[in-house]
Amino acid sequence: MLSKALTACDKHIRIFSTRLLRKYATLAPHSSNGSDSRSPSSVCEWAIRLLVTQLYDPEVEVSEVAVQILGESCNWKSHLEYIVRCRPQLDHLNEIGAPLLLRFLSTSLGYQYLDRLDYITQEMDDWFSLRNYRYVTLVEASLTRAFTALTEGPSRSSSDELRRPQEYGSLPPHFYRELTRTQEGCDLLRESGHFHEFATTITESWAEKDDVEGLTKLKGCLWAVGNIGSMDLAADFLEESDVVRWIVRIAEQSEVTSLRGTAFFVLGLISHSLHGMEIVAEHGWKAATDQLGRSIGYCLPQQLSVFFSVKVPQRSKQGHGTSRAKDITPRPITDEDPVHASVLSFVADMANAVLAKRAANDLNGQVQHTRSSFASVELYRKVRDVLGSHNFRLPVRRFLLDLFDKGVMRKIVLDEDESENESIRTERAAQARPRLV
C-alpha cells in the first residue's frame, strides 16, 4: 500500500509518503525495533530502495525530499555503501542531487563508482574555479538563518517529525572534505595542487580588507582548507604548508570582522582531527572537547583578548569633538537672489517628511511663475549641494532634478558660460529691499 502511495497518488500524498520513510531509512545499523521482526538492516534497505525509486519522480519536490532523507541515511557507512550499490542516477536533478553525490566520495566504493562516471575530475575543476566561492555565500546565509531562528525561537507544528530536522551548526557538504575521507581522494588532491593554491592565497592575501571579490576568494580558500584539515588523512597537507599559522593571524589581527569569524570557524574545523588539534594548540589556541577528549568543533585562544579585541583605525585629529561635530553638521546653502534663496529653502524642506508636501507645492508654484530660474546653472549646482548634505529618498531626488530645464545639463557638460540677464537679477534684488515711505 505504501508503494502505491509513493507512485500512484497525487504530489502531496507522494511527498507525505516519502517523508514517512525517514524513520526506517535512518535506523542505526545495530538498533532494534520491537514492532518489526525483521533486522534493522533489512528494514533500512527496503526503505532505501523505495527512496531511490522516488529520485525519478516527475515532481522535483518529491525527488528533493528523497535526496534529503538519503543524505541523512549516509551518516552510517553501511547505509551509504548500500545506496551506492543501488547505483542511483542523479544527473537529471542537477544541483538538487549534488549533495548526495558528494557523500558518495566518503567511501572507496563510492569513489570508484563516481570515478567511472568521470564525475570527480569535472566536479573538482568546477569547485576550484567557481563553486568554492559560492560556498561562502551559502554558509553565511545559513548562519544568518540559524542565528535568526535561535533568537526568535523555533516554530513547532504537528508535522515537524516528518520534516527535515534543522541542524544548527552543521556545515553544508563540501567537495574537498568528502574527497579527503579516502586515501584515493587525498592522492588526487595532491596531484591537482589545489591545496597548495589555497594555502598560497591565504598566505599572500591574509591582510585583505577592501576588495570585495578578494575577500570572497580568501574566505572560499579558508573554508576549503578547513574542510580538508578536518579529516585525519589530510594531516600531511597541514604539516607541509604551515597554513594554520596564517589562519590564526587572520583570526587575531584582521580588520574585517566577517573574515575573523570565518577564520574562527575554520580553526574549529581543523581541530576536529587529532593532528589538527595539536597544530592549533601549538599556535596558542585550545580546542573544546567532550568528556571523551574528542573535539566538538570549537577552539579559542588561551588569551581571549587577542580574538575579541578589534583595533579601530585612527583618524586624524582636527581639533576637539565639538569642532568635528560642527564640521559634520550641514551648513545652510543660500543665495543672494531672493528667488533662488526661496527655492533652496524649499529644497531643504523636502528632506523633512512633515514639510515635504507643502515644499513640493511651493516648488511647483515657483516653476510656473519663475521658469527662468530653473535654467540657471548656478542654482542647479547649489541644489545639488543641498542634495549631498541631506538625506533624500530617490523619488524626491528625481523630482527636484526634473524641475530644471534640460539645457542646464548641456551647459554643465560642455562647460558653457552662463549668460544670465543681470538686469533681471538686479530688479529682483531691488524688489526685495525695503522701501522708505
Image: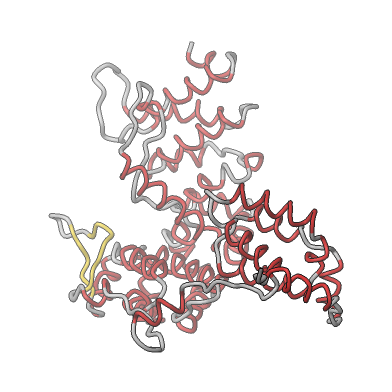
Q: Does residue 115 appear to the left or right of 432 in the view shown?
A: left
Q: Nearer the viewer, residue 285 or 295?
A: 285
Determine whether 235 is above or below 398 in the image: below
Determine whether 51 is above or below 287 in the image: above
User: Which residue is pictured at 21% across the width and 75% down the height?
Assistant: 305
- On the image, the x and y values in percent for residue 197 come to 53, 77
User: Which residue is pictured at 51% across the width and 39% down the height?
Assistant: 85
- On the image, the x and y values in percent for residue 54 come to 55, 28
Determine whether 150 is above or below 273 in the image: above
User: Tell me, what colour scheme is on the image?
Assistant: secondary structure
User: Which residue is pictured at 59% across the width and 72% down the height?
Assistant: 333
Q: Does residue 157 appear to the left or right of 421 in the view shown?
A: left
Corner quadrant of residue 326: bottom left
The answer to whether residue 384 shows anywhere in this view is: no
User: Which residue is pictured at 43% across the width and 50% down the height?
Assistant: 142
Q: Nearer the viewer, residue 325 or 3?
A: 325
